[in-house]
Amino acid sequence: MDPFTQSLIGATAASAFSREEELKKNSLFGALGGIFPDIDVFIKSSNDQLLFVEYHRHFTHSIFFIPFGGFILSIVLFLIFKSKTSFKRLYIYTTIGIATHGLLDAFTTYGTSLFWPLFDIRVAWNVISIVDPIFTLILLSFLVYCLTKSSVIFCRLGLLLSVIYLSFGFQQNQQVKSFINEIADKRGHKVERLIVNPTIGNLILWRSVYQNEGKYYVDAVYFPLISKPKLKQGVVLDVINKETIFPELGPNSVQRNDIRRFSYFTNDYIYLHPNYEFIISDLRYGSLPNDHLSLWGIEINIEKPENHVIFKNLRNFDEKIYSDFWKMIKGDFTETIK
């Protein structure tokens, strides 16, 4: 999730296990631990732009990195705080903070190497958006109460409520999947693969992408707490094969391998962007929950197969997109499935 929320949950978790007279100090250590795994953002290469995509949320986010990350961060912090705390306490509370990071990221949609090196899979439970104001506000409110009242009970309550909120997101995910399976059945489709993601900042509006007979079907789903769910049909796109798309590229070329790497990152939800001739994009995300306007992709150069692909930022949010998104959040859909 966003760094601010990561620091909040690290601070809240550390405070929940702290003694009341050490709350402020230990919450700081937990907050620093909560953002420490994102040190991987410095892994970059101007020559190989996919290196950043490949290693963000990689080994520093694994559960097996937790004790080592806590040790490394504690050494650095001990040089600063050695007169105010022991190395043992530093290690305990920074490690608690680090332990929250990869797990929270796994609840989002991006993909996290949570069990590396045991399993080389990118875990994405698709329960919560990378930015969710309600989730963040829960943590912030209870952490502030915890620190101002010097009472660990508020941090424990904050953690409990955050878990309940994530559980609600999981329930929403499952209900949206069931809803989409019903829709696909009405369309006469067999769902071969399906992914549903909450859109930015909420658990009410979802993006659905499923595969059927060589096509991707993209839909927006409005799934409120009380009223009936709604669906707005979106684009239909061709499924592409990472091994045969752009046949000019040899099977062992650098760019063919880069396509495989990008496909792995996207959980194989790749497509040819209709607005560009040589861009393969990530279908998991769109400017709107039912469109083809992906947030990023890779540009292929068939004339230079041994050069790395170029990672392209395709975000292009204009006033109309913001307006349409806000209407969808409010359930203003033109097509309703009863």
Image: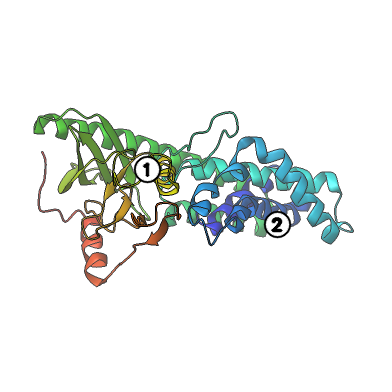
Which structural element holds mark 1?
A: loop
Assign the C terminus to one quadrant of the image.
top left
Category of crowding for the residue at label 1, using alpha-carbon neighbours closer than 10 angstroms: few (below 14), some (14–19), many (at least 20): some
Category of crowding for the residue at label 2, using alpha-carbon neighbours closer than 10 angstroms: few (below 14), some (14–19), many (at least 20): many
Residue 297 vs 161, above or below: the answer is below
Residue 297 drawn at (x, y percent): 36, 55
Image position of 266 (left or right of 271):
right
Q: Work out whether residue 116 can be spotted.
A: yes
Name the N-terminal-most of marks 2 and 1.
2
Judging by the rendered image, the residue that carries numbered circle 2 is 28
Q: Residue furthest right?
A: 83
Residue 312 drawn at (x, y percent): 38, 61
Tell me the amino acid under the disc marked 1.
Gly
From the image, state whether disc 2 or disc 1 is nearer to you. Answer: 1
Judging by the rendered image, the residue that carries numbered circle 1 is 250
Residue 180 vs 1, above or below: the answer is above
